[in-house]
Image (spheres, rainbow, N blue to C red):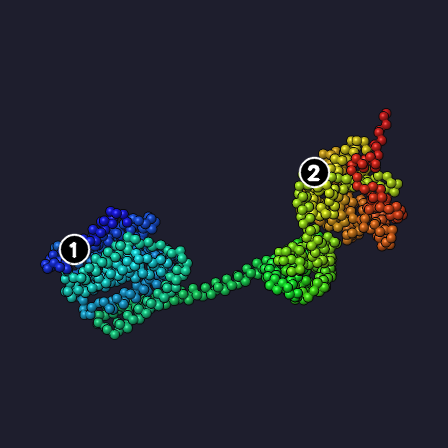
Amino acid sequence: MPLAERNLTVAWAVAAALLFAASLWVPHQSVRVFLDNASWTLALCLSAFWAWRGRMQVPPAERLLHTGLFVGTLLMATGQMVWNLQVALDWNPFPAPADLFFLAVGPVWAATVIRATFARLAKDRTYPASLDFGGAVLALLAFTLVIYLPTGEMRSLAEGAVLVLYPATFLTAAGVGALAIPTVGVRITRSHLLVLLGMLGYGLSWMQWNLMVIHGTVQPGLWFNASFSLSALAFGWGARWLRFEVSADQDYRRQCDQLMNYVPLVSMTLAAITLVLLFITPDGRVGVQALILGCCLLVLLLAALRQTIVVGLLNRLRTAEAAVLRNEEQLYQVAHFDALTGLPNRRYFEDALERAVADASRYAHAPDRRVALLLIDLDHFKSVNETYGHRVGDALLSEVAQRITQLLAGQGLVSRLANDQFTVMLLRPASRTVLAQRAASLVEGLSRPWELSEVGAQYMGASIGISLFPDDASNSAELVRHAHSALHATKSAGRGSYRFYIEEFTQITRGRLELRRRLHSALQGGEFTLVYQPQLNQQRQTVGAEALLRWSVDGKAVSPDEFIPLAEESGLIVPIGLWVFETACRQVAQWRAEGWQVPVVSVNVSTIQLREPGFTQTLLGVTQRAGVSPAVLVLEITESQLLDESLYAIALDLKNAGFALSIDDFGTGHSSLIKLKRLPVGELKIDKVFVRDIVVDVNDREICATINALARTLGLEVVAEGVETEEQLQLLIKMGCERFQGWLFAPALAPEQLARHWLQRQVPLAVH
């Protein structure tokens, strides 16, 4: 508070107190009347000043309540001025003109508080709050009337109205103010209590004053007269510091809501007490009794309406609670279970595995407290998904989930980890032998044909990696990583089997990750080279060459069997494959420029490259820039890739563009004669797996002979890979094979060596 305001407040309050004290001791009645009025005037004006100062201290947007409080104190001070004038004129009727100002104060305060309260309420709370306010005010009014109004007939209707309105207006304002605090959730302070005390003091003071006027006992210089000044000072000081702000404490807000639930019960109780008092002490005034009885009945009606709202709210809460429980169950299902297979998902599996490992770690030395993790990956699922579409793939995954569950017969937790990966967690496995038997049964069960209604029987096996806690890992994360390492070892060894984790797998996995990292910069670093292995006919004349990619890391050669799969997994096979094709085309052009006769050059192409948009046009652009014809390039595509129906149109485009097509590694896939007949290819390459043991293995000889016979029937040329001995060569010649490639003739050579040893000079044209 500023110093000037503090000094003015002290002087004003001291003056009002001294005037009242003097009124108690001055013997002359006229002087006591003057001192009483002067004390009241100072107190009411000081109350109005404080209310005005309180209004000025709050932001303009929050002045609604303070404006109403200030207007009420101003009306009170104005009524006192009119009363002073009446006293000066020695005119003191009842009711008096000053009563008009005094009686307007209560309604102004009540309306202001109600308006400020409802402005802070949500729309759905406005109706219940209205019922609470109405019931409480009517109950308080009826109770006040039954204990306040004197018995006997009143001298006039105006006198009765004044007697009723004084307590009704001020006590209504006090009641509304008290209810506003819990209704809105305002944190109650001393300022709120002073404002309520001032309103209540005004109402009680005027009730007693009016009764004294009726009975002719009003006298100046009484201690009772100070009640008006004290009420004014309490109200004004409270209004000076009042802040009507909603509390941010949710717990306090809930307590306020609980308190408001008891308001209808309190109102009904007060109305019931009023009715009892009304019938016990009747005063014979039918109008007053009817008014009190009507108020009580309205209270009961409002309470009943309020109870109806409560019941409806409870029903809505029960319905909402049931819906929330259903939603929580659905959310839990969505968050923890796979929508396609119904199995627990990765999140559920990881939580369960972590709990199982934590439980087992408390008994780490007990042999029966181990946790086994089987990681199952479907073999060739991607091909099925790409060939027949995701709808067939989803149906197959659902069938896989059911078959795994049936094979385990309730033993272990089955989860779907990723697209075509499933996990099985087994607690306390008896031994590694038992685990091996279970893994073998899973491999065998998943290798059986899958009957799909849209595409018929499909054959698709599975690979499994197994790790155990605490044998192979110290925590759940390591357990999963090591199961992945074992799974990768299984797939690298040929798929369709299972393997337990060993430390060597981790080293292999780390090596693969390092290769993957180095592979990203290998092309820009110029680490790739292209070598060429010659292809010869039966007369050992060069009829072609295959371009082979080589990569050296820190001077050490990396096997294509290691880095080509990594390039395909990471998508780097697209830029690497394009570099191979461009390099081969430039090399052909360079050989010809140097005068060498260049037969066809074979280049391996990946499925990922074939699926690239505009692949055919990209290759044609490369050949045009290099100045070579597409006819001198043979694109080698593996059997399993070329038999994919979705790639048939791409293969046909390449054939129409002038490129020759070859089926690489023939015999290792699942060839269909009908599909093979339709393919736009010109040659078959017998995989070196069949050539290697052709001399000693009858089955391999039969396979090679069958491939040669099939090729002749279809009008295709045959190239035998991996020819290393003279015996192999002679057997292949007898079978009708016309082209050969292998170490018997030459390894893969640098371009200069190939040209020097295996290419012939071009014959110059005769000069006419």
Q: Amino acid at mark 2?
A: Gly
Residue at 22%, 58% (x, y): give it.
Answer: 230
Relative depth, front residue between 410 and 288: 410
Q: Position of residue 120 (x, y in %)?
A: 37, 55
Judged left or right of residue 265, residue 456 is right
Q: Secondary structure at mark 1?
A: helix
Q: Position of residue 654 (x, y in %)?
A: 74, 42
Which label is found at residue 493?
none
Residue at 64%, 64% (x, y): give it.
Answer: 365
Q: Position of residue 318 (x, y in %)?
A: 47, 65
Q: Can residue 768 be seen from the camera position used here?
A: yes
Residue at 53%, 61% (x, y): give it.
Answer: 328
Q: Amino acid at mark 1?
A: Leu
- Label 2 with label 1: CB-CB less than 8 Å: no
Q: Secondary structure at mark 2?
A: loop
Q: Is residue 303 above or below residue 483?
A: below
- According to the picture, the residue beneath numbered tag 2 turns out to be 526
| Image quarter in which the C terminus is found | top right
Q: Is tag 2's residue or tag 1's residue first in the polypeptide sequence?
A: 1
Relative depth, front residue between 212 and 112: 212
Q: Can residue 406 be seen from the camera position used here?
A: no
Relative depth, front residue between 17 and 430: 430
Residue at 74%, 49% (x, y): give it.
Answer: 641
Q: Position of residue 517 (x, y in %)?
A: 66, 45
Q: Residues within 10 Å of mark 2 (few under 14, many from 20)?
A: few
- According to the picture, the residue beneath numbered tag 1 turns out to be 19
